[in-house]
Image (cartoon, rainbow, N blue to C red):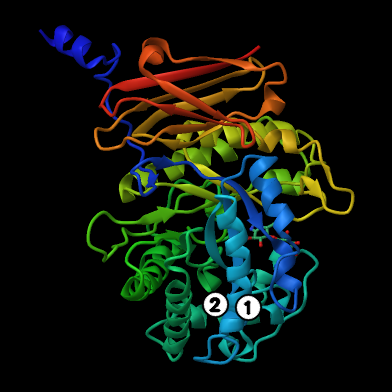
Amino acid sequence: MLSTFLAMVGCGRDSASPASMAHFIRDDQGRAVILRGVNVMSSSKSDPLRMPALEAADVTRMSQQWGFDFVRFLIFWDALEPEPGVIDQAYLDRVQERLDWFAAEGIMVLVDMHQDVYSARFCCDGAPEWAIHDDGLGFELQTMWYANYFQPAVVRAFDNFWSYEGEHQMLQDHYADAWAAVAQRFRDHPAVIGYDLFNEPSPGSAFDALELGRPANEDGRSAHFDRERLGAFYQRVIDRIREVDADTYVFYEPRYGFPSAGAPSYLPALNDPRAGEPQLVLAPHLYSLSLEATHAYAPSDSTVLDWEASRSLEAAEAGTPVVLGEWGLDWSTEGADRFGDDVTSMADRMMVGWAYWSYDPGSWGFWDPATLRESPSIAQLVRPYPRRVAGDPTSFSWDEAAGVFELSWRGARDVTAATEIYLPSRVFPDGNDVDLGEDAARATLHLDSEREVLSVTLPADECTHSLRVTRR
Ligand code: IDC
């Protein structure tokens, strides 16, 4: 009886397999969206106008040469709100001009309120002068930019920012209002998929230098910071943004420090006050500390696996999708390709999007605007991936050595649009063969050869589908 029914609707044998635990960003046609791309870009930090060294031609290249559908675009509080309560609309005009370039190429943009080491005054980027309350404590510039996080003035500036019940409540209120101004401006922009609330929020004096390598410490300083400070701050900003924009996804990051190396985050559940499904996304970073310290990727380095375990647990608890907002490395590192492969394979396993750090030229880069040449590292970044899936992806993977890409998904009755897969010819120099198994007879395939995107349209049903692409 059951098998007759399955045969009638044409489901594959394994259609009873349980749905995956993963959550996904959805497009307006209900498809799962997998984001792959790059951070744009560090050069903005030191530009007087806070604009990236980027032209429209770069954006075309991202989409057409490398198959990226995603950019994490850096903006800065100091440019946005140079004086308290004054939003610089001319700055947002400049941002919008770039957003239009991305929209024209179908690239989705995560607007990232970036900071490093609190503010430009201390070395790096972020808060405007008027928002620095360091109580006159000392600051000595350190050689490694991130070592500046531990200078007394910087620690105090963060403490004052996080302490909402203290004297400087207005800092967070201004920050939330500044976000509302951004949301008001870009809520209907076709490129904008989300807002990344705060880049790498440093815990200030709650930073726990001893937490790495210890078992999860639920009662430690980090847990307290995540629950009492960071979670409450995020909730305030989310609530403020939702007053002006009910729909755009809000992305939030674990605290700065060890979570990006795989340690747990203790962020509480956040509430999305919009009507309908929450539109919140966990947007952690991933960097290997030992790789950076030794300039080598040790076979014993467990960063990627630790990160996968921590983030999978947290995302399941929060019920959010995950997008890896930053990962990257100096490609002259010993074992760099192995690290690239481990990160991107893990991201496929978790079915999450990512943005490589960054589009800037140099030893971490993959493109040299002076010579118009790609670096060999591009091979680690341009991989087949499903951009849009009509239903719920249940797994996908790319095996470079074997030349095999596989995708499985479960359809949904109300999702009729095509599943779209990026299949770059550079990994299939002599072409490929697409195998859809039992679906072959009822699938409609279309290849956009300029963008190297294969579209697969199937009748909308709740069956499990799988596709295998093999290098010739
Ligand atoms: C780095 C830039 C570097 C700059 C520094 C401080 O690559 O040129 O001097 O910022 O502005 C992050 C940060 C990101 C960092 C990146 C690489 O979010 O801003 O960019 N990184 O160090 N977290 C971990 C690594």
**Neighbour tally class for label 1: few under 14, some 14-19, many 20 plus, Cα within 10 Å:** many
Q: What residue type is labelled 2?
A: Phe
Q: Is ligand 1 closer than 8 angstroms to the Cβ of mark 1?
A: no
The answer to whether residue 328 of the structure is visible from this angle is no
**Neighbour tally class for label 2: few under 14, some 14-19, many 20 plus, Cα within 10 Å:** many
Residue 165: x and y in percent read 37, 85
Q: In this view, does 393 lie above or below 358?
A: above
279 vs 425, nearest the viewer: 425
Horizontal relation, residue 38 to residue 216: left or right = right
Q: For the residue labelled by badge 1, is the local secondary structure a helix, a strand or a loop?
A: helix
Quarter of the N terminus within the rendering: top left
- Which disc is residue 158 wearing? 2
The answer to whether residue 163 of the structure is visible from this angle is yes
Q: Is residue 23 above or below residue 247?
A: above
54 vs 404, nearest the viewer: 54
Which residue is at a point 37% across and 57% down the rendered structure image?
280
Which residue is at a point 31% across and 47% down the rendered structure image?
317
Residue 273: x and y in percent read 26, 66
Residue that protrudes farthest toward the left in the picture:
1
Which residue is at a point 71% across and 43% down the rendered structure image?
291
429 vs 356, nearest the viewer: 429
Horizontal relation, residue 8 to residue 242: left or right = left
The residue identified by callout 1 is 154
Q: In 3D space, how far apart are the residues under numbered discs 1 and 2 (Cα atoms)?
A: 6 Å
Q: For the residue labelled by badge 2, is the local secondary structure a helix, a strand or a loop?
A: helix
Residue 468: x and y in percent read 50, 17
Please say if the residues under marks 1 and 2 sit with CB atoms less than 8 Å apart.
yes
Horizontal relation, residue 19 to residue 81: left or right = left
Residue 11: x and y in percent read 27, 16
Which residue is at a point 48% across and 85% down the rendered structure image?
171
Assign ligand 1 to one image quadrant: bottom right
